[in-house]
Image (spheres, grey):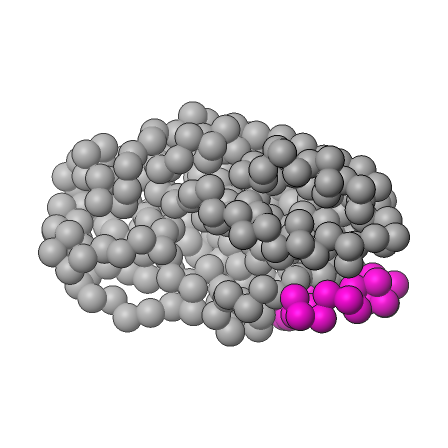
Amino acid sequence: MIYLYAYSNHRSDLDALRRIGALWKALDVRGVSAEILVNDYRAQLAGRELGLPPATTIETVLDIDAVAAYGDTVLIDSPETLPDERLAHYTSHFSKLFLVRPCGGQSRFSERILDPWDPQKGPIVSAEYAAASSATKSGRVLIYGDSDYNKRLLHSAEAFDGLGLELYWGSYFYVKYEEELLRHFSGLWESEEYAELIRRSETIVTAMPQTAAEAAAAGARTIWLDRGTEPPCVAETLNSCGVQRLPWSDLGTLGRLLDDISSAHLSASSLERWMEALLD
């Protein structure tokens, strides 16, 4: 059995779940069974909105062996710490263990490292978005993130005034400031409409790298708002896809940039490579 674990919490975005979801769908097309593991009930709901099957919820990455059995294959997409003792146990307990690490990394035991942001091989993106690249598109949308825990978007909302942007309401957004935020946008999209937004939007502005990659695959004019929290390989990979990077500190120039960008593209994806590694 193949187990795919995606980490999330109410302070972060669902990038890992979207990568895991793309991989699950690719395996499903081939008739290969896999089970998704998550550690948060809202990730369960978000997964269903992305067309994924019900996932199994566990507490942390340390509890994977409570579900996965000896000889299974496990892929972990999580920033959680795996102590050497637990990692050694996993590598001996499971037939294959894969760890997702942005910009790569060094294997500590016999685990295999998968890089979701390899500039030469491309990001992990569901095939459904590339299939929509030739579809008719319209509208501008801000998909800031799934969470605004530190209220960065709320505090900077005036920068979006008059730009004609609609707003994607993230799964972890605070309901209590919906009315205040919406004063700065021309419309609202709910979280269950995420995939449709990626497929149909002409222009997508986002602070989530994974969403920027998906928008590029769909052929949208794409701007990535760099909050300064991602490693260098992320910017390099998105740049290779034609995504325009805008540092958060330069948010005031977004209006000019919106009128001067071209459609992005995805020249390569690591999805098939990851799938082949799982099935090898």
Q: Position of residue 140 (x, y in %)?
A: 81, 48
User: Can residue 177 be seen at all in this image of the molecule?
Assistant: yes
- Position of the N terminus, as image quadrant, is top left
Left or right placement of residue 44 versus residue 150 in this view: left
Left or right placement of residue 250 versus residue 50 in this view: right
User: Can residue 52 be seen at all in this image of the molecule?
Assistant: no
Residue 207 occupies which quadrant of the picture? Answer: bottom right
Is residue 244 covered in magenta? yes
Q: Position of residue 185 (x, y in %)?
A: 80, 44
Q: Position of residue 197 (x, y in %)?
A: 71, 40
Q: Position of residue 201 (x, y in %)?
A: 77, 45
Residue under the image location 53 percent in, 47 percent down: 149
Residue under the image location 66 percent in, 61 percent down: 224
Left or right placement of residue 48 versus residue 248 in this view: left
| Magenta-highlighted residues | 238-261
Q: Nearer the viewer, residue 10 or 236?
A: 10
Q: Nearer the viewer, residue 227 or 97?
A: 227
Residue under the image location 62 percent in, 34 percent down: 176
Question: How many marks can you see?
Answer: 0
